[in-house]
Amino acid sequence: MEHLVQHFGGIIGLKFKNISNKTLSFILSFASGLMMSIVCFDLIPEALGISEFSTVITGIMLGILIMVICDVIVQNKLKIKKNSLLKTGIACGIGLALHNLPEGLAIGSSFEASMKLRFVTCNYNIDT
């Protein structure tokens, strides 16, 4: 389902060739608000339910630190303006790539664990 929605959004984006910076900023802000609400109201409470508070806070802080470092590297290496949409796009791409790393580790680990877990993991990733 997730991939269908992403493709649909991409197709809509391709139809509008000359989107103003104001409109693009609104779209990015809207997407950010949705992601932050998912983190605050779904992911953090779920993590607190299965782990200790200190582990959850450590994970959050590590994620923030990694993205701040990526932001600084992108800005310094590519000599991009501080608040440019190109820098935002590159940072989002890096964030998505890093986001997929734990999922890949889970899939690889499930292949080693058992045939049943392998089947469940593969079906989950096809469905989402």
Image: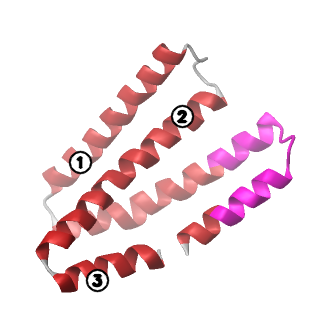
Q: Position of residue 74 (x, y in %)?
A: 48, 23
Instruction: In the rendered structure, find residue 59 and report the number of the disc placed on it.
Output: 1
Q: Residues within 10 Å of mark 2 (few under 14, many from 20)?
A: some
Per the image, the residue denoted by label 2 is 90
Indicate left or right for 69 with 105 as reference: right
> Disc 2 or disc 1, which is closer to the eye?
2
Residue 119: mark:
3
Distance in Å between CA atoms under marks 3 and 1: 28 Å
Q: How many marks?
A: 3
Q: Which residues are magenta?
A: 7-29
Q: CA distance from mark 2 to mark 3?
A: 34 Å
Q: Quadrant of residue 25?
A: top right
Q: Residue at x 15, y 63 (%)?
A: 51
Mark-to-mark CA distance, 2 and 1:
22 Å
Tell me: residue 22, above or below residue 60.
above
Identified by mark 3, the residue type is Phe
Mark 2 touches mark 3? (CB < 8 Å) = no
Residue drawn at point x = 21 percent, y = 81 percent = 117
Percent position of residue 88, x then y: 57, 34
Q: Position of residue 121 (x, y in %)?
A: 30, 76
Residue type, label 2: Ile
With respect to residue 20, does 79 lie above or below?
above
Quarter of the picture holding the N terminus? bottom right
Left or right of 86 in this view: 41: left
Q: Secondary structure at mark 3?
A: helix
